[in-house]
Image (cartoon, helix red, strand yellow):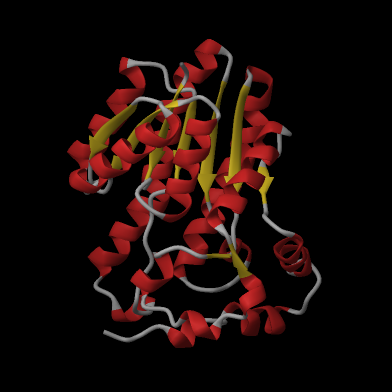
Amino acid sequence: MPTALVTGPATGIGRAFADKLALEGYDLVLVSRDEAKLKEVAADITRLHGVECEVLAADLTDADDLARVEERFRTGPIEVLVNNAGFGQKKPFWANPVDVEEKQLDLLVRVVLRLTHSAVLPMIERGSGAVINVSSVAGFLQRNVYSAHKAWVTNFSAGLALELHAKGVAVMALCPGFVHTEFHERMGMDKSLIPSFMWLDATDLVDAAWRDLMRGKAISIPSRRYKLIVAGTRFIPRALIARVSTVGLDGRRRA
């Protein structure tokens, strides 16, 4: 059976991708820091879908751990990589220690670059494979440092998709908006401040993303409402975009 590697698969979008890939017939390599939680998720996926799950516990911001994950691409074929691991900050940029900001930069940018590089080299040799980099609609807005990181992920993925299409390798940036996951609670965001129509279901999101990947899209933006928001950023005055970009930020609890 083909194999897919998913980072951050324990909950939310990552877990939805793990379930989707299992349903599509992929064995899985599950990567995250919490080995006990990974084993629980692996057992659950195997029970539900009958696929094999390899657990690879690693802190991707640790150089040695990241090197172990990179080595996994050389020890056995990985047909699909989903770069999903990430986190947000509870405080604004200036209130965080710079090493905390660098850790987020490492996870959202440097890790995506390195794992994508490790994945596509053998994919090019085989003439097939796919990389899905989970980005965000925030990358189209002037929201915060997180937006800057996600803007890089989207542009990196779209550019690489153009270069690798002729080699049989697909690369896609998935740009969701607000999704019902634990991510926003961990950020300390008051979810009640976000209008209900802006929330997406993780399973529906991943199903739509998979369809977009099969259609050869380089950027996947889920739902008509978020497509309209992204399209609007090209025409709406920057001052109004700046106001929209702050939705939810005032609801972050200050530590």
Q: Is residue 190 left or right of residue 205?
A: left
The answer to whether 74 is drawn above or below residue 196 in the figure is: above
Task: Estimate the x, y position of residue 178 in percent, counting from the top left.
Answer: 56, 67
x 74%, y 66%: residue: 225
* Most distant residue in the top direction: 126
Closer-to-camera residue (148/225): 225
Closer-to-camera residue (213/163): 213
Task: Estimate the x, y position of residue 205 in percent, counting from the top left.
Answer: 60, 52
Q: How many marks?
A: 0
* Most distant residue in the front direction: 47
Q: Quadrant of the C terminus?
A: bottom left
The answer to whether 93 is drawn above or below residue 6 in the figure is: below
The answer to whether 158 is drawn above or below residue 90 in the figure is: above
Q: Quadrant of residue 246?
A: bottom right
x 30%, y 16%: residue: 75
Task: Estimate the x, y position of residue 169 in percent, counting from the top left.
Answer: 60, 24
Task: Estimate the x, y position of residue 45 in percent, counting from the top left.
Answer: 38, 37
Q: Is residue 211 left or right of residue 9?
A: right
Q: Quadrant of residue 142?
A: bottom right
Q: Is residue 254 left or right of residue 149?
A: left
Closer-to-camera residue (221/24): 24
The answer to whether 162 is drawn above or below residue 98 in the figure is: above
x 67%, y 26%: residue: 165
Q: Is residue 145 left or right of residue 87?
A: right
